[in-house]
Image (cartoon, rainbow, N blue to C red):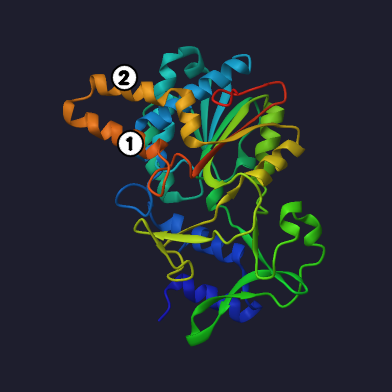
Amino acid sequence: MAEPLEAEIRRRIGLAGPMPISEFMSLCLGHPQHGYYVTRDPFGSSGDYVTSPEISQMFGELIGLWAAAVWRQMGAPAEVRLIELGPGRGTMMLDMLRAANVMPDFRKSVAVDLVETSPLLMERQKRTLGNLGIPIAWHASLADVPDGPAIIVANEFFDALPVNQAVKQADGWHERVVGIGEKDKLAFGIGPIALKFFAQTLPPQVRMAETGSIYEWRSDTQPLELGRRVVRGGGGALIVDYGHVESIIGDTFQALRGQRKADPLAAPGAADLTAHVDFQALGSTAEGLGARVHGPLDQATFLRRLGIEQRAINLKRVAPPDKASAIDVALGRLTAGGPTGMGSRFKVMGLSAPEIATLPGFEA
């Protein structure tokens, strides 16, 4: 017998036919009763994946100092919103605010806004951040956050936004869908009707793709809202995620369960679903609204420019001897290349109001 979410997906397919990948991903992650982020805490060593803030306090501390430096570039407004998209357990924001103590004027000016849709994670964030003496508000989307001067951070947020896929066929591009296949199992399929005018919207390097190629794009409005906020508020934004610098073809839709790759169509709602971030598309969206785009850089370069190696040395000076090696391991995990390191797989992009010529960490 199918689990409740799979039964609901099958019911919808039975009524309306195979569903787009984006609809399937949205249901798996955000269904109000059975969605992945609604029913579990996916973070940490006991969860399905580990994020940079969970690996080491150094990550969040450096982002906090980055935010303080951007606040200065903004002219040190008396009130500024520090907004985090998808704040997880609240770990990064806690580390950011602790680091911000070195600039008391910045700390006094901050009100925190967290964009979160998971009730379970929201409760965890309240426990983590509840005793800091700083105004904190929660919102379902960035569009719900009041306007004003703002600094926005998003670590591993955009990869979890629903992704669309299209497959190149002899007669054009067709949407990739999820339907019922052999042995009555959920299976990928191809929509029967070619997408009109789709090829005209593609980046030049994608238009001549071979038959069978897969192209991914996101239609979520949050990148638009991010660009608008940065321009109107005169501030900056930082996006850290895994993805590609240029728009390319390829299937990156994947599932993680128990920190291992899994079948994305198996056990809907029980695994994390993600797809790589197209940084070229994200940057172009923000640029079209007047924002200045910085980067992207690989995470290792960005963190080194912010001083992570010196921060590791300083931490080891005050750490017990048995903790020093853990600091080195964390530094390596955040900055190393290869399959186990995050230094080259993860990219960092900055956005700013046009009057801010450069952002910390992106200087040539």
Compared across the picture, whether 260 is left or right of 344 comes to left
The residue beneath circle 2 is 314
Foreground of the two, 123 or 335:
335
Q: Image quarter for residue 216?
A: bottom right
Say which quadrant the C terminus sits in: top right
Q: Could one spot residue 295 in this view of the protein? A: yes
* Amino acid found under the numbered disc labelled 2: Asn
Of the residues under marks 1 and 2, which one precedes in the sequence? Answer: 2
Dot 1 crowding, Cα within 10 Å, few <14, some 14–19, many 20+: many
In the figure, is residue 101 to the left or right of 17? left
* Residue 77 visible in the picture: no
**Which residue: 72% across, 78% down?**
192
Question: Where in the figure is residue 45, as x and y percent of width and height?
Answer: 30, 48
- Residue depicted at 55% across the width and 78% down the height: 11
**Looking at the image, which residue is at 49% across and 81% down?**
185
- Do residues under tags 1 and 2 come within 8 Å of each other at their CB atoms? no
Residue 16 in percent (x, y) is at 65, 77
Q: Which mark is residue 205?
A: none
- x and y percentages locating residue 46 in the rendered image: 29, 52
For this rendering, which residue is in front, 303 or 265? 303
Write down the residue under mark 1: 330
Element type at mark 2: helix
For this view, does 78 lie left or right of residue 355? left
Q: Secondary structure at mark 1?
A: helix
Marks 1/2: CA–CA distance? 14 Å
Which residue in the rendered view is the most extreme toward the bottom? 183
